[in-house]
Image (cartoon, rainbow, N blue to C red):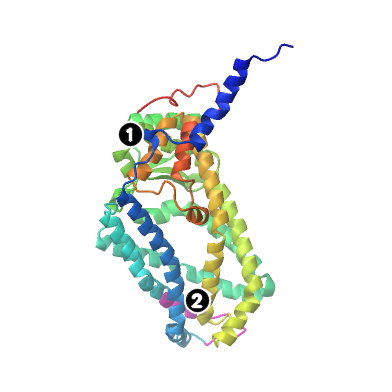
């Protein structure tokens, strides 16, 4: 058997080292985001505002208790319904009255944060939302949030009837609710805020349909969202399950992006669709909610002590203990975010790879990510701790490198890899 020639080793080395050069070295100038100081200022303001909002939210819950607002809301709630004992669940009317007042307090308390965020978006030219539309959307968000009243009251009932197994029954109830939320949100909730229309016939639709056929989605639903009524940011996403599954492109993308970048973006979204990422996230949420409810059940003795001894209440069944319970749930949800977002980043990476295998548009995809940094002011390389905790996507810098370095192993040559815009 003859020995391999040196040139074979050289070719193999180039195949391995070539992509690594993009992954670890400097990017070509045309693929290095030119981020102005204005964008950096915007990024830091958004990051600081987001972190401050978490502290401000918890402070608002604490203020609701120490100012006596919780006590007065509880008295009003119980005055409008039968008084509840320490071992009996609160009446549904009491829960409804208390939660309406508590959630209204939260909306008013968080209003400075919402207004500040809106002002920042308007100042940097990203928001088209009038103050009237802003107030309308905030009100609708609050009204939709009131749907939790039934779930909270049901949780009290389960806790009284099922003893230590209450969390298992609640988890079983939450599973179909989570499923229904994913299925119904695109057709019930989203149309409240946006208008959706089918993508018009033309060369772009024809090419997207061809991509869908190659991806194994013969009857894909592709809609256009009128995002521009609220924002100038470019986006696309996949949502829904079963008959409500659809790929959505916002009208800003159609207006601002060249066709190859739109196709690269849609190819990414088809990756989510074909690889069933929504199902994966749904199952992850089911598992995660089970763990959080189990942990909450383990914390019940401590919560009971806080409610009775520290807060001078009748126990966790007292409606005035609701801020304590919601605070603990909020903290638990925050603590699980690194795990949830690590999964999200993995799925986004897989969608990038799928899109490149499907479209072979390496350069347009890299240009798309450069545009997110230069046009939408997204941070291409955020602080590591924020990326680890809150980053739902890989960094733009890493996505640009991946788009330029990825060579799918297929019989079809990637003719776009060396192309130029």
Residue 323 image label: 2
- Residue 71, compared with residue 226, is above or below; it is below
Q: Is residue 219 visible?
A: no
Residue at the image position 37 percent from the left and 44 percent from the top: 372
Q: Are marks 2 and 1 in contact (CB under 8 Å)?
A: no
Element under disc 2: helix
Residue 351 place in picture, x, y as percent: 51, 40
The residue at which mark 1 appears reads as 258
Q: Residues within 10 Å of mark 1 (few under 14, many from 20)?
A: few
Residue at the image position 52 percent from the left and 31 percent from the top: 19
- Residue 280, compared with residue 103, is above or below; it is above
Q: Residues within 10 Å of mark 2 (few under 14, many from 20)?
A: some
Residue 375 vs residue 82: left or right?
left
Number of callouts in the render? 2
| Residue 273 highlighted magenta (yes or no) | no
Residue 120 place in picture, x, y as percent: 30, 59
Residue 16 place in picture, x, y as percent: 57, 28
Residue 30 versus residue 152: which sits nearer the camera? 30
Residue 337 versus residue 399: which sits nearer the camera? 399
Residue 43 versus residue 360: which sits nearer the camera? 43
């Amino acid at each position: 058997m003859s020995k391999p020639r040196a040139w074979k080793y050289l070719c193999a080395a180039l195949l391995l080292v070539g992509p690594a050069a993009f992954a670890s070295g400097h990017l070509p100038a045309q693929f290095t985001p030119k981020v102005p100081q204005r964008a950096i200022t915007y990024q830091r303001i958004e990051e600081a505002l987001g972190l401050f909002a978490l502290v401000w939210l918890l402070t608002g819950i604490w203020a609701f208790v120490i100012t006596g607002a919780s006590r007065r809301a509880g008295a009003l709630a119980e005055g409008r319904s039968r008084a509840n004992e320490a071992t009996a669940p609160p009446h549904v009317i009491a829960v409804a009255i208390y939660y309406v007042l508590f959630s209204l307090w939260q909306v008013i308390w968080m209003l400075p944060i919402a207004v500040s965020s809106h002002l920042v978006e308007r100042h940097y030219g990203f928001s088209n939302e009038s103050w009237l539309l802003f107030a309308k959307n905030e009100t609708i968000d609050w009204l939709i949030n009131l749907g939790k009243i039934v779930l909270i009251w049901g949780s009290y009932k389960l806790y009284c009837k099922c003893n230590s197994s209450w969390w298992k029954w609640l988890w079983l109830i939450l599973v179909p609710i989570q499923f229904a939320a994913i299925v119904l949100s695109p057709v019930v909730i989203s149309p409240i805020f946006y208008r959706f229309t089918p993508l018009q016939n033309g060369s772009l639709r024809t090419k997207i349909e061809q991509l869908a056929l190659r991806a194994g989605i013969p009857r894909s639903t592709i809609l256009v969202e009128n995002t521009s009524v609220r924002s100038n940011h470019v986006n696309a996403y996949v949502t829904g399950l079963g008959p409500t599954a659809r790929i959505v492109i916002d009208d800003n993308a159609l207006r601002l992006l060249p066709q190859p970048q739109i196709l690269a973006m849609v190819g990414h979204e088809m990756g989510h669709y074909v690889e069933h990422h929504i199902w994966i996230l749904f199952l992850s949420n089911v598992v995660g909610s089970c763990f959080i409810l189990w942990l909450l059940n383990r914390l019940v003795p401590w919560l009971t002590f806080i409610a009775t001894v520290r807060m001078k209440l009748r126990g966790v069944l007292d409606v005035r203990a609701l801020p304590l319970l919601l605070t603990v749930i909020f903290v638990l949800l925050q603590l699980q975010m690194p795990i949830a977002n690590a999964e999200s980043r993995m799925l986004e990476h897989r969608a990038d790879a799928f899109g490149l295998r499907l479209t072979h548009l390496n350069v347009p995809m890299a240009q798309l990510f450069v545009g997110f940094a230069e046009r939408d002011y997204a941070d291409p390389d955020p602080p590591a701790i924020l990326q680890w905790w809150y980053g739902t996507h890989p960094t733009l810098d890493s996505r640009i490198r991946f788009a330029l370095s990825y060579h799918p192993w297929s019989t079809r040559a990637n003719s776009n890899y060396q192309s130029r815009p």
